[in-house]
Amino acid sequence: MFLRFFTNRFNFFDLFEEQVSHAVKAAHFFKEAVAQDRVSEEMLSQMAQIEHQGDNAAHTIIERLNKTFITPFDRQDIHALVMELDDITDMIHNIVSRLRVYDIIGVDKNLVEFAAVIEQSVQAVASAVRGLRHVKNVGAVFDACVEVNRLENVGDAMRDRVLAELFATEKNPITVIKWKDIYQDAETVLDVCEDVVHVVDSIMVKQA
């Protein structure tokens, strides 16, 4: 019995890495999607599939958490990490869905720029999460967390710049509402990435 609990303890790291891999796939797909003239139903379906895979990974971890006596670190931290990682994929899916529902046509250079920053941030999140397996490698985890924080600041500046440009140049109020929603959601993804590394930071401090 004890051996089973002990073995499950180390399986959590595989599960974390699987979950964050879906966030990475979502970010990469998003970058490819915004480079197209229009989000098709097929593209939205593909994004929904990635989001569903992320949900399944999150549910698996929570289920394992509820059944396992020994965990690699604090149970509340595990739950928080899983929920925040799930939010990354959910938010990206939400933006792709908006692009389809709002029937956005044409490539928007600002959203392309946002998508590139989001992909960089999610990749840094993945590096931080992978680092949890090796708690002695604090430096690499810290560097990844700092990069996510830097990119969140970049996102804040981008949001302010593109919204100012939108309000100054776009005369159609419906178009303004649509793009305001999309840009703010894009920046929110970067906020959620920062939330993830805050959890990672907390875990690393407790394990030190």
Image (cartoon, helix red, strand yellow):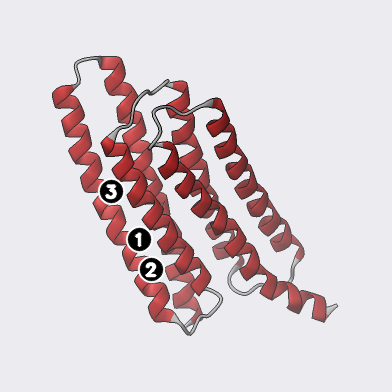
**Residue drawn at 31 percent across, 60 percent down:** 149
Q: Is residue 86 above or below residue 11?
A: above
Say what secondary structure mark 1 lies in: helix
Query: Residue 61 at x, y = what percent?
Result: 67, 59
* Mark 2: secondary structure: helix
Instruction: Give the amino acid type for the residue marked by disc 2 in the picture.
Output: Ala
Q: Residues within 10 Å of mark 2 (few under 14, many from 20)?
A: many
Q: Position of residue 96 (x, y in %)?
A: 46, 34
Picture disc at residue 148: 1
Q: With 43 as the anchor, is 63 left or right in this view?
A: right
Q: Is residue 9 above or below residue 94?
A: below
Placement of 79 over or under 108, stated as above or below: below
Q: Amino acid at mark 1?
A: Val
Measure how far apart labels 1 and 3 are at the Cα level.
Answer: 10 Å
Q: Residue at x 31, y 22 (%)?
A: 177
First in residue order: circle 2 vs circle 3: 2
Give the numbered dot on residue 144: 2
The mark nearer the N terminus, 1 or 3, is 1
SS of the residue under disc 3? helix
Residue 10, given in percent of the width and then of the height, sits at: 67, 75
Q: Which residue is mark 3?
A: 155
Regarding residue 167, the answer to whether it shows in the image is yes
Nearest the eye: 201 or 90: 90
Category of crowding for the residue at label 1, using alpha-carbon neighbours closer than 10 angstroms: few (below 14), some (14–19), many (at least 20)? many
Residue sitting nearer the eye, 75 or 149? 149
Left or right of 9? Residue 179 is left
- Dot 2 and dot 1 residues touching (CB under 8 Å): yes
Residues tagged 1 and 3 counted as in contact (Cβ below 8 A): no
Cα distance, mark 2 to mark 1? 6 Å
Q: CA distance from mark 2 to mark 3?
A: 16 Å
Residue 96 tag number: none
For the point 37% across and 23% down, the residue is 105
